[in-house]
Amino acid sequence: MSALSDRLAAGKFTVTAELSPVRGASAAAMTDRAAALRGWVDAVNLTDNQGSHVRMSSWAAALAAKAAGLEPIMQMTCRDRNRIALQSDLLGAASAGIENFLFMSGDHPASGDHPGAKPVFDLDSTQLTWTAATMRDEGRLLSGAGLKPPPERIFLGAVENPFAPPLEFRAERAGKKIAAGARFIQTQYVFDTGVFAGWLRRLGDLGLLEACHVLAGVGVIRSARMLEFLSSGRVPGVVVPEPVRKRLGAVPADQTGAEGARVAAEIIAELRELPGVAGVHLLTAGYEKQTPALLEMAGVSRAD
């Protein structure tokens, strides 16, 4: 399988990071941004028109990241394409040497820069995961038609939100994606490691940690405006605990980012000690240059 799969299987603490494709037609611009992460992270997620905003396609960005020496994780959302296009894009990407895929439903177009666009949602993320696993393992499309050759090396992932209500069903929801074929899961922001640890224990009780690797989402709150947005409830399942809000609110506005980085570094250090955490997924898209300093602050050495 992929280098990411091998690293996770070996039990090495793994760091992935989000890398948003550029809004333009320059692969060189992607290469420049990717260079800041090389040697620090084990793989990068290339988002798929994140937030329903048009950007370079995730497969093209993944090829640019690969050319820059990074292991790409190509994200695919169900929002913009039907099952024909999704399967076609997966085959094309796999033929070009992309091996890691992360599936999600995607934000509704109403929240993006083309609010009048028609959403597709022909499949949901769990169905797409199952479809990709069937293409790989059984060599056939969703229609039943055979594949010659199938995408044998693809490594499949999914997203999960341990903090979205109702909390008691979040582990079971992850279990459906794992049953469909997901072998790694990247989570939404983790600010409350206690609640997150409870979710991990439930995964363990269900025997799911033996089948899937969990990468905990960590991000830096860079400004008072970002703190207000994440605390507003407008981002589903993101919960910023009162102690974190007070801590960031107590510093001058021009120091919020620095204090936010310290909070994130402390969270990474705490997560490393939790049984069942395979690594962290850094939600720092657009701030790639700060990633090395954040990891050093957290005591995480350069990727080997």
Image: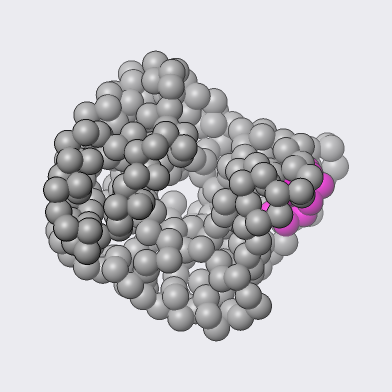
Q: Quadrant of residue 56?
A: bottom right
- Residue 144 lies, in percent from the top left, at 83, 37
Residue drawn 22% across the image and 58% down it: 253
Residue, far front: 252
Residue 300 sits inside the magenta stretch: no
Establish if 285 lies above or below 227: below
- Residue 161 lies, in percent from the top left, at 43, 34
Residue 89 sits inside the magenta stretch: yes
Q: Where's the C terminus, which quadrant?
A: bottom left
Residue drawn 37% across the image and 68% down it: 288
- Residue 270 lies, in percent from the top left, at 17, 42
Q: Quadrant of residue 18?
A: bottom left
Frontmost residue, 89 versus 298 = 298
Q: Quadrant of residue 103?
A: top right
How did the renderer colour the structure? one colour
Frontmost residue, 146 versus 67 = 67
Residue drawn 63% across the image and 75% down it: 24
Establish if 248 lies above or below 92: above
Left or right of 289? Residue 145 is right
Residue, far bottom: 28
Residue drawn 22% across the image and 41% down it: 245
- Residue 74 lies, in percent from the top left, at 57, 57
User: Which segment is the magenta one?
Assistant: 80-90
Name the main secondary structure of what is drawn in magenta.
helix
Q: How many marks?
A: 0
Frontmost residue, 38 versus 187 = 187
Establish if 289 lies above or below 166: below
Left or right of 8? Residue 29 is right
